[in-house]
Image (cartoon, coloured by chain):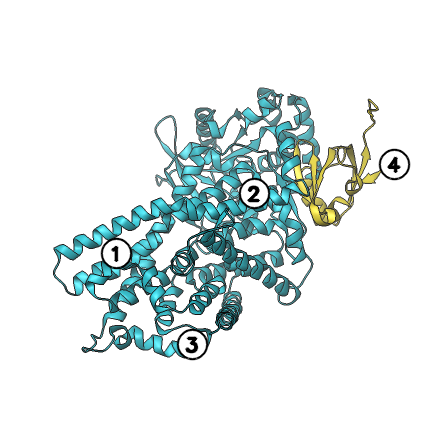
Amino acid sequence: MAPMRIDQLTPGTVAHIVAIDLDELGERRLREHGLDEGVEVELLHRAAFGADPLAVRVGNACVAMRRSQAAGVTVRVAQRLEAAE
Amino acid sequence: MSEVMTAPVVALVGNPNAGKTSLFNALTGARQKVANYPGVTVERKAGTLTLPDGSRAELIDLPGAHSLEPRSPDEEVTRDVLVGAYAHERVPDAIIAVVDATNLASQLRFVLELKALGRPMVVALNMMDLAERDGFFIDYEALARELALPVIPTVAVRRRGLEAVIAAARDALNAAEISAIRSADAPAMLVEAIGDMRGHQRQARDIAAKVVSGGDANQMTRQIDRLVLHPVSGPVLLAVILFLMFQAVFAWATPFADAIEGAIGWAQGIVMTSLPAGPVRGFLTEGLLGGVGAVIVFLPQIVILFAFILVLEQSGYMTRAAFLMDRLMAGVGLSGRAFIPLLSSFACAIPGIMATRSIADPKDRLTTILIAPLMTCSARLPVYAVIIAAFIPDRTVGGLANMQGLVLFGLYAFGVVGALAAAWVLRLTVTKGAGGGFLMEMPKYQLPAIRDLAIGIWQRAWAFLRRAGTIILVSTMVLWVFASYPKAPDGVSQVDYSIAGRIGAGLEVVFAPIGFNKEISIALVPGMAAREVAVAALGTVYAIDADDEELLEVELADRLRGAWPLPTALAFLAWFVFAPQCISTFAVTRRETNGWRWPIFMFSYLFVMAYLGAGATYWISKWALGG
């Protein structure tokens, strides 16, 4: 599947991080919270009123971030092993 | 090396939410000291660790951090202490790194950074019970081999693994004695530690992949979050929790407060019957018991409020609340992170202002500090409670809520709206600039441990009582003297004639336009020491003018009802929503902002808001009541 950004994911879809493109400080802060190339992520929740911030599963942790930060993270949706529905 | 027999220092370090404080509580029990680092106001939590051989070490709980490259003033303290760059703290002889066992892949990165510092170190693999519940199998012996560090599985909240941690800490300290600490190398080692972020990330994940098997992201937490973070049910639930919290503060505390009040009345009675009339008896009943008693009565409410806040924090809900509030906070130029210090400010602005140290962005942080005093702190409760009891009827509205509770909720809401408006204006003017974003880990839900709750509540209740016993006692005593002397001749009101009365008469010129009488003007002065002193002061001022027989029978609320028109009472409430009535808040703001500029600014803008708010309340209610 084509790469997308975390904020474009449908809730419940599992994806892997391909790249983090933010300014240096922003990138470091995301990395400190466990984001890294290859790490599994899943969009869990969007807040009410403007769908910002987002709750994102990063590996085994749940991280809250603004949409603008999530938009700096490119991901690739995992291959679906079983095509449910 | 010095031969002085000083206890070695062991530091607890870890990510926020790794269970560091629980482990600290479990290891040190009630034998801990909470103090401030000199010069700055990060809490220094230290306790005594008794080693297996009976010797002792000092255990310090460093602020939670993600990295040795600090993002916030909090993390800066942690980094500086660890590399020996902190003037007021000895370099730790050993480190206990606390990691959340359910999130190893991410948290091991920080462990690798810490390890690069070259200090003797122990890894406490905490929350092992949650890891087991989620089906993780962690080969901690393999982890110890990979890290080349001792790894101890622990469950801090259940007190599991404590002896092993202590034994490992002792071994680490022994190692520390053998290898002289190379603190001169620390800066170079620090550069190395933080230089290779990606390398550490890869290494951490490789290790985690080797030692962790099975497991599933916490299903229970995900289920709860479906409700708690839901766009509709989430905000509704938050509103319900906050509303319940404030209703409980008023309703549950009543029997306890009544008991304390009864005890004070009983003590006053004993003094009245056992001492002859005179200055000593007057001082004991009116000054000491009347003044300090009027404040201690509010201990139950403060304990309940802190209990709620601690439960919200320890259960993991607080970060969800921050998530839900982020959008609203972003609307006024802040982030959800500001919500946590602001909620703490409902108990007291001082810990709230200190808690802003976790906010990375300096302008976000400054704005949060400036609006923190607008959150209704527990010191206002005594003021609100007396006025509400005197002027608001105690009846049920719509079969659901208590009218007095509703008014109290309204005052809290008034403060919050004022704070948001102030933040919005400040962000467009004095603290203009781009926001710092919002990034925060939301921990797994956990039942709070009774022990951690009890310790947390005890520390806060003790701080309150200490204030009542010192600053409030002293200002009440001074006021009593000022209000009692010089003695008025017959037929002249004692309060009018006294020193306090003359000061009040001067101030009344300023406050009369917003409906305040002389007694209020007098009470506002000692009320600068602490807000709740204003109640004690009103108690003292009105008691001095009353006859002795009257004193025991008429409570302050009844006396105020007779003395104040309703618009004055409402204006007084409005004043306290905004008023900068707390010296400690300015002192802490000065320290946190390194100068007088911001505390002076804070005082000025709050004074203007309070004056305008009280004035508007007075004139509008006067007009509405047909006065």
Q: Give the secondary structure at mark 1.
A: helix
For disc 1, the neighbor class at 10 Å (few under 14, some 14 to 19, many from 20) is many
Q: Chain of mark 2?
A: B
Disc nearer the start of the sequence (3/1): 1
Amino acid on which disc 4 is placed: Ala
Q: Colour of chain B?
A: cyan
Q: Which residue is mark 2?
A: B318
The structure residue drawn at horizontal position 26% and vertical position 75%, both measured from the top left corner, is B498
Residue toward you, B342 or B366: B342
The x, y position of residue B212, in whole percent, is 64, 23
Disc nearer the start of the sequence (1/2): 1
Callout in the foreground (4, 3): 3
Q: Which residue is mark 4?
A: A2
Disc 2/disc 4 C-alpha distance (Å):
37 Å
The structure residue drawn at horizontal position 38% and vertical position 73%, both measured from the top left corner, is B517
Callout in the foreground (3, 1): 3
CB contact under 8 Å: marks 1 and 2: no
The x, y position of residue B288, in whole percent, is 25, 58
Amino acid on which disc 3 is placed: Ala
Q: Which mark is residue B289?
A: 1
Quadrant of the frame with the N terminus of chain B: top left
CB contact under 8 Å: marks 1 and 4: no
Q: Which mark is residue B512?
A: 3
Among the chains pictured, the one given yellow colouring is A
Callout in the foreground (1, 2): 1
Q: Is residue B353 left or right of residue A62?
A: left
Residue toward you, B477 or B483: B483
